[in-house]
Structures are given as structure tokens and as C-alpha cells.
Image: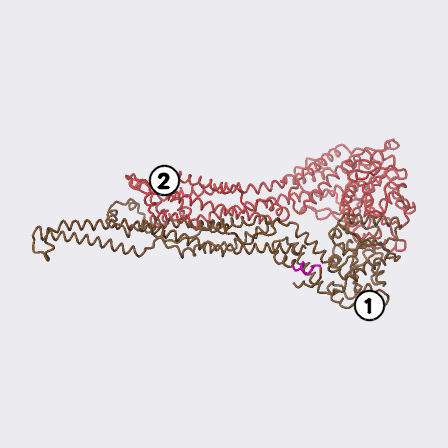
Chain colours: A red, B brown
Amino acid sequence: MTSPARKTERRPGPPEAGDTSTGPEQGEGAPGVEHARVDDAETPGEQTLSFPAIRDDASGAPDSEGSGDRVREVSLPEPVSEGLTAALRQLGEAVTDLHFGLDVPGADEARKAQLAVLAQLKDYVIPRVHMSTAPALIVIAGSTGAGKSTLVNTLAAQSVSATGVRRPTTSTPVLACHPDDHGWFAKGDLLGGLTRLEKPIDGKATESIVVVPTERLPQGVALLDTPDIDSVVEVHSEIAHRMLDAADLWVFVTTASRYADAPSWGLLRLAKERGARLVIVLSRVPIKSREVIVKHFGRMLDEYGLADVERFVINETKVVDGRMTDDDVVDLRMWLADLSVDEQRRAQAIQSTLNGVFNSFRSRVPALARHLETQVALRADLRSDVDAAFMGAIAEIDEATRNGSLLRGEVLARWQDFAGSGDLMRSLSLRKSKAQPQGPERLRALKAALRAGLESVITSSALRASEEVVARWRQRAGAGDRLAATPGLGRPSEELVRRAARAISGWQDHVSELIRTEGVTKRSVAKVVTFDVDSLSLIFMVGLLGYGTTELSPSRKTGSGGALPQRLLRGLLGAESLRSISAKARSDLRARIGLIFDDETLRYVDALDAAGIPDEAAATRLYQATYNLEVAR
Amino acid sequence: MSVTTSTGHGLGSRLAALARVVELGEGRIDPELYAEAAQLLLRAGDRLKLSPDHTVVALAGGTGSGKSSLFNAVSGLELSPIGVRRPTTARTHACVWGLDGAGSLLEWLQIQWRHRFARASALDRGESQLHGLILLDLPDHDSIRALTDTEADRLISVADLVVWVLDPQKYADASIHRRYVAEHAGHDAVTVFVLNQCDKLTPEEQAICIADLEDLLSREGVTRPRVVATSAATGKGVDSLKAVLAESVAARRAAFQRLEADLDRLMVRLAKDMPERLRVEPTIDGARRAGLADALCDAVGVPAVGEAMENVYAVRSVDWVGWPYARWAAKFRPDPLSSLKLGDVKDDIRALVGSAVSAQPAEVDNAVQALADGLAGGMPDVWRDGVRDSARSRADQLPRVLSEELSEIAPPLDRVPGWWWVLKFWQYALVLAFAAGLVWIGAILFYGVFKDGAPPAEIFGDPAALPWLGLMMASVLGLGALTAVASRNGVVLGAGKERDRLESDMRRRVAAVSQDMVVEPVERELHRYNDFYAALSTARR
């Protein structure tokens, strides 16, 4: 056992397989990690055991014999038990904490897998780790109509589970065990989440289990009859899988007409993946074709890599009162008796299944983590779609305010009006003249036109950006598609126009202020000319946004280059001052638009958040917990 | 698509409507559903062209349920291999009663030659009621082999009548019920359920089994399940199955019923998100058009152009029709701007004023968007996007076209009307007259008052003319000033009138352009919407 202190030295992820004889679980390892050797010829039964202490204790525990209560609570060696319990608790917490918010493809499977891992921890692993030599639970699973209940009844020699021609027949799991073991199963932690019943009750199929004591079953083994895995009643399949997750041995029952069914092979694959101890029963075999069928099925199993699994064949026979004759199951009964007597073999079987479950965590838990990571990645992608779209909108606005497209339509007409009617020249007046510039209405009209123009540039860009976000989200599989359908995301928010108007008038005030405070008139000019700040700031804005060449022109010979407003302003304020005001004004405008767009972006982020934020650290915790479990084993 | 074969029951017209739905719905319905609709249309066309006298019956079911045994029992021959190994049948076998015309149908079903069997001689044995039957023995759909083989799926989806062969072990399997039966609820008329291997059950068990199966089917939406109990091994019930088949074959309607059922199922899914408004007003009303035109006029700045014209004319006319003396006097006033060395600002302003009207792209965009938004209320999102896209289909060119169109009619602001020249000439003539008067006064002073020689004419030497002359010159000055004031008013008045005319001209042009470039594409889309949902409703029946 490795000391728990090692866990901090390593990155989360599957550690090197300490136990190389793990069952066949393929392709799940993280890159770079040499994965467990897959060897089909090696059955789970031959796995080396990592709990030698238990086996020793179990075989040599005389005090447990003969006690009225047959539940033997053999505790693990202290440090191991503590480490393992802590690791399991940590794993349980890490898995419980998972939250898959986005409905991406595979999310449902991941949620199911999460529940399955949790249930298996609670129902089976934790109780089994603490009381490892309690009676073995043999779960009988298979297709509907395969004769599971008939088999259990026959072995138990009494009608413990209902049989019949109705499909599916069994809906509540039925557990049959020796009366001495009854206490353990009636109260124990194994499958602790299920209500114990005396006999099946209609309508209480889920979350309950019938426990029946019977003398005919040997001590130390219990049979669990499960619902089918493949009928129309889908909840049955879930129950059956939950039972299998708690099983120490799997008995898979199929029939002569069923053995090629896809669901059956799905179950066999699961058993293989889990490294569970498996026994296969082929029942309802017509005597005349027994040889052909058994051979064919055997070959299929061999090809599937299940060559060494123990197999039993039951002939098609008359079923009376839900039972076959004892002769039909004599092999199986022998096998059960062996298992009951040979404590070591039983312990070995139990241990190998438990090991298989631990091994399966090594791939199942990282699979959860990987799904979580895809969710986190998808969320990041969706988020970056939003950012990209609005960055594009800002670039578009930048472009529109530089290439002169703003100086069109009404803005152009008002500017022509303002300049052509002489107001432009009148706004500059001789120092001594007290004349106020005439026609403030033209000034106001130009200002309003400029504001309206800028506003429409912003709203139009925001609209495009919103549409682009939705278009991009639609192309993202699963979740993005659904999120894109959130009403209202395809267009800008209601407040956009109001916000834009406020931002622009704020900017216009800011520019006036800049001209007032920083637009120190050249001394040579100040002697002769004074100017009206409002007019000048307006001329400045037209120059900045309509001509957009302010930043470029000063390189040319002063006085000749540039458009009218720039030349005018440069003449009045000086090139240096004009350049600095231009830069400030432009960055201020960009910041204000950025703020508006941040508000817009927030709606998309809210939609993302409403879908549920996957906790990014949870994946790391999962890897950590998996690793710690490996260490503690 | 030629699916208008007279089929009765309106199947032909429904399929024609579906063809229209497919034609109009591209890009407007879920791609998967769209592909399915197109496929159904294709299949219907094919099936209706092929032999209407034959009925294709498929025996489908899980492995080991006894499809092949039943196939052999019905055909009375050992045609399909039966085995105990599972799965047994890997290829579809077909048996035809009455081969005439069945060849192309079998070809269409893609049944291999060596798996086709004919029962031509069956007529002799009193099986004439099965004439026209094509019985298919399908591979299973639920074995591990079926995971990679879609033959069963393919034939189940094209057969006219599907017979589900179930057995007491498997009748409740999810693989049949979830994937096929529940999916095909509504196909009651073309589905038969057979509970085979009933020799393995006692009569009481069989009754329980059938009741349970019927109950299960009705819970899945099969309202009138036809369940036949058979035993291929003992031959029990095979005749009842034959009777059911014979009935379908004789009616020759299974093919239509199957297509109808498929169509119904497809339409249910297509019509799942039917909008509240199945029909929108396909033409854009006057108010909306006017609203669009107004918004576009604002984007061009029509009112501002008018105002600018009025103001600029009034100012510029001073240079032409103003009183020359006032102009000259202004030149002597010191110009503050000259000290700024700004270059020729006046030229700049003149050039600016001379530039043509143009449209602001962002405002044009918003105007078009507003129109689309107003129209698409109550439409599903895809169609709303469609309306928006069609409104924008030519939005890229719209600002340019508007600018060009309006530049044609809006006069440049630096234009000089002819009468300005006349007035300018008149003013200079007055100045000349004033100058001549000055010369005259000088002459009178020279000759008449200082007597410095003989005047060339007596009129230049008569001092008595001086007061009259003075009066005349004052009048000339006064006349100049008066003309200047009057013509200025004339300019303003004229500009006002021209402005009104210009504005209405511009509005007309803008409306015409918007009709061409926005309204018409949008109306086409609205028509498409109406046609689509009309076709959908027809196909739905």
C-alpha cells in the first residue's frame, strides 16, 4: 500500500496499474499511461487478490461459526480500512458534487453513469469493503422470459418469485437466502437504499426488494431474482442493473431462442468490462437440438472472449407450479453447494468481483470527469462565440467611424448646411467682436444628426452581433442549439437604444469638456480669434468620425493636408493638442460602446449560467479521488 | 413528381401537397424531417408506379420467433431455411403468388434472384385468394448481427403490410415495441400481430398471453390491434393468418393504406410546431410601406437636404444677386482666418457643399430590420429569419442605389440658376451706370464749374444738371439695393418651393427603390409562407 502522502506528488489521473491482472477494460487510460494488460484468457476468477488479510481472517475465524447471527463482521486491517474508507468517501463526495448542466450529447448518459456509480458505492462497495465475507450475493439476470424466476424457485425449492406467461413477469427483485443469512440481508447495508418487503406488493416495484428465507439454499450464498433487462418496461432494466452493481456473482440466464439477442450481449459486455465473476446459464434448450445450440453458443462465447466462463445448460422441460424438477438443475445446485462450503473460493469470487468494480471505477470515474471537461470546454466555446461576435461589432463600428460612412445621409446634409450657410465661419470670430454665432438651431440639428447616426451604427452592429451569436451557437452540437432558442437572444435587448443614446450624449459632453480644458488655443491664434466651444467640439466630432483621418494627416505638411475640419482645428489648436484630444475622444467612445456591449453580452452569459455552470474543479477532484482510491486499495 | 395517380381517398392530392411542402420547406424545416419527407415522397412515387395488383407482406420479428417456419407454413413449401442456431435467416426470402408484374416490384424491394420463389401453380390448389401476395421472410432485427445490418429496417419501412411474428418469450421485448410498434402507432390497418409458438402454451395461458399483448399494444397507441395466434409447428392458426392476408390482398389497398399511414405519421411530426398564424397578409400594407419609405428617407436625410438647400442658396445667392457695394465693403473687413494660414477654406466649403446626397448604411439597415420585425410576428423563428433575410437580400446595394437614384434629382448645392446671371449683370449694369454718373459729374465739374476748356458736348458742361444727376445716381444706388433685397427674397422663396418639390420627388424615388429592393422580396417570402402552410394543411388532411 502506498502512503496517502504520495497523492500530492502526482497529477490526477489513473496511476500506473499496480495490479496488472485487471479485467478487460480498454482504451480508457489517459494518454501516456501504460494501461493494464488485457488478456482474454484470464478470467476474473484468477485475479490476484489485494486483500490477503481478509482471506486469512475468513478462513480461520472459528468464532464466527455457530453463532446465532451469521453475519460476520470482519474488519480490515486498521490503516487499510481507514485509508480505503476515506478514499471511498472522497470518491463518493466528488461524484455527488458533479453537475452536468448543459444538455450536450452524452449528458444523459453521464448523469446515469453518475447515479450508477453513486448507487454502487452506497449499495455495494462500502458495505462490502467493511464486511467482506458476508454471504455472497448471486444475482440472476437475463432477458424477459428466459426463466430466471423459474430457476430461482427451483433452486429454492419453493415459489419465492412469481412465474407466468405474462411478459415481463418479475418487477420487484426477490432475494432468497438461507434463514441463517436472513438477518444480514434483511438489515445489512448491502442494497441499503431499498425497502425490504416480505412479499411483492403491486405498484411498489421500484426502490424495494423482497427477502425470502428458504432452507433449501445452502448457507453463505443468496440468490437474487431480478427483473428483465430488455422488455418494454424500461425501469426494469434499470433495477436489474442496480442489482447487478451490487452482485458478488452474476448469473446470466438466456434461452435457446434468445442467445443471439443484442441486449443479452450488451449485458455480457458489461460483465466483461466490470470484470465481474460471471456464470452463464442457457436454459429452455430443446433436447433434440441441444448439441448444435450448445456448440454454437459456446463458439460465440469463445469468440467474444468469454471462453473460460462457467456454463450450465438446462433442457426445455415441463414447468409445474413455477418450478422445474430438481434433476434439471442438479449441476447448478452442486455448484452452489461448493460455493457454500468452500469459504476460500467464495471469498475469492467476492474479492474478484469487488476488484473488478474498483477497476471499473478507474475508467468510469475518469469518463465522468472527461464528460465534465467537455461541458466546461463547450461552455468556454459558447462564451467565446459571444465575445467574438461582439468584438466583431466593435471592429465594425470602428470601421464605420473611420471610412467616412458615418458622414452620409442626414449628417452630411446637416454638415453641408452648417458649413455652407456660413455658421462654420461665424463660429470663429474676431476676438473683439461680441457677436454670438447665429443659427444655434443648425448647430443643434447637426449635433442631433450626428448622435442619431452614431446610434444607428451601434444598434445595427449590435443586431448583427446578436444574430451572429445565435448563428454560431446553433452550429454547436446539442446544448448550443437549445440555448440559441432562448427567446430574445437573436436580437439586441430592449434597452440598447436607450443605452446607446445615453452613451453618445455622454460622449459628446465629454468631447466638449476635452476641447474646453485641453484645447488650449495657439497663442498666435488666441490673439486674434476666439471660438465657440460647442461649435468647435461639433466640428471636431465631424472631423473625427466623419472623415476619420485625424490621426493620419499631421504627418503631412501642416496647413495643407487633411479635410476641412482637421485643417481648421489644427490651425486653431495646434497639431499636437489635436492629436491628443482625438486619441482621448476615440478611446472614450470605444470604452462607452464597450460598456453597452458588455451589458448585451451579459444576457448570453446569463443564459449560459441558467443552463447550469459545470464546476471546473470537480473534474480535478474526480481524478484525485480515483487516484487516492487506487493508492488505498 | 408524378404522384397524382388516381388513388381515391385523396392520397394523390395529399402527396402532391407534400411535394409542395418539400419544395417550399427547404431550409425551413428540420433537416432530418425534411429528408424523411423527401424520401417518403420518392417511395410513394415508386410504389404507386409499381404493380398495384400486388401486396407486399413482410414477416418481421425477433430471432427465434419462427418467421421462417411461418413463411414456410403459409407458402406450403420449405423455402426458407429453419434452424436452431440463432440468428438463422440473414437474407430476405420472397414468395410470390401470381408472378405477372411482380418482377419490377421485387427489383425495387432489392430481393436477390436466388431468394425469389413463385407460387404460380398455387391457383390450382385453391389458393386463388392469395393471388397477388408477395410474402417476405425478413432477417431478425434484434440479434447482434442486426446491429450492423439494416435490411430488416429497410423492408419494414417499405412493405405494404407488416406481420409482426411474436412468441410467448419475446412478445414484450423493448426492441420490437420501442423501435417499431410505438413508432408506427397509427399503422393499425397495415399491421398484423402474430403470436407464434402457441403450441407451447396451454389454452388458458394463451388467452392470458393474448390479452396481455393486446393490453400492451393499446397502451402504445395501437387502437385496434389485430392479433392472430398461430403455431407454425402444428399448423394451428395458419389458416386464420392466411385469411387475414387474403383479405388484404383482395382489397388491393394495403399499399395505399401504408403510404397514408406513413404520411399521417410524418404530418403529425411536421405539424408539431404549427404556428398560430397559418396565413399572414401576403402584401405589405400602405402604412408599413410608408413607414419604410420614411425611415429610408431619414437615412438619406431628405428633410435635412431640403433645409440645407434653402439655407445654402440664401447665403450663396448674396455673391450673385447681392448688392455689389456691400460685398466689396465686406472684403475690406479683416478676415481672422487668414491669419491662421488655413489655406483656402472657402474652396473646401464650396467643394463640400457640392458633394452629392448619400444614404447612411447603418440607418438603412435599421429601417429594413424594423419592417421585417413588424411583419414576422406570430411566425415560427425559422420563417421570421426567412423574412428578415429576404428583406435584407439586397440591403448591401440599397445604400448605393439610393444614393445614385437621388443624386439624379437632387441639384448640387453649388448650382447657379440662369436668373442669377441676369441679376448679376443687372447689378453690374447699375454699378456701371453709377460709375458713368460719376464720370459725368466729374466732366461737369471740369468743364462747367472750373471752365478748363470746351466741353465735347454741352451736356457735360451744364452745372444745372448736377442736382438731377445726383438724384439719378442716388436712384441707381437705391435701385441696386432694392433689387438685391428683392432678389434675395426671390431666392429664398424659390428655394422654399424647390425644396418642397425636391422632397416630394425624393420621397417618390425612395419609395420606388424600396418597393423594388425590399418590399418585393419580402412579399415573395410571405407568399411562400402562406403556400407552405396551405400545402401542409392539405397534406395533413
* Residue A301 magenta: no
Contact? badges 1 and 2 (CB < 8 Å):
no
Mark yes or no: residue B213 visible. Answer: yes
Indicate which disc residue B120 carries: 1
Q: Say few, some or many: other residues with alpha carbon within 10 Å of mark 2 (under 14 / 14 to 19 / 20 or more).
A: some
Residue A309: image location, x then y, percent? 82, 48
Q: Which amino acid is tagged 2?
A: Val
Check disc 1 and report its element: helix, strand or loop: helix
Say which residue appears at 82% left-offset and 68% top-offset: B120
B538 relative position to A137: left or right: left
The residue singled out by tag 2 in the image is A533
Q: Determine the CA span between mark 1 and mark 2.
A: 105 Å
A482 relative position to A416: left or right: right
Residue A587: image location, x then y, percent? 45, 42
In magenta, the rendered stretch is B9-16
B231 relative position to B52: left or right: right
Tell which subunit mark 1 falls on. Answer: B
Residue B6 drawn above or below residue A91: below
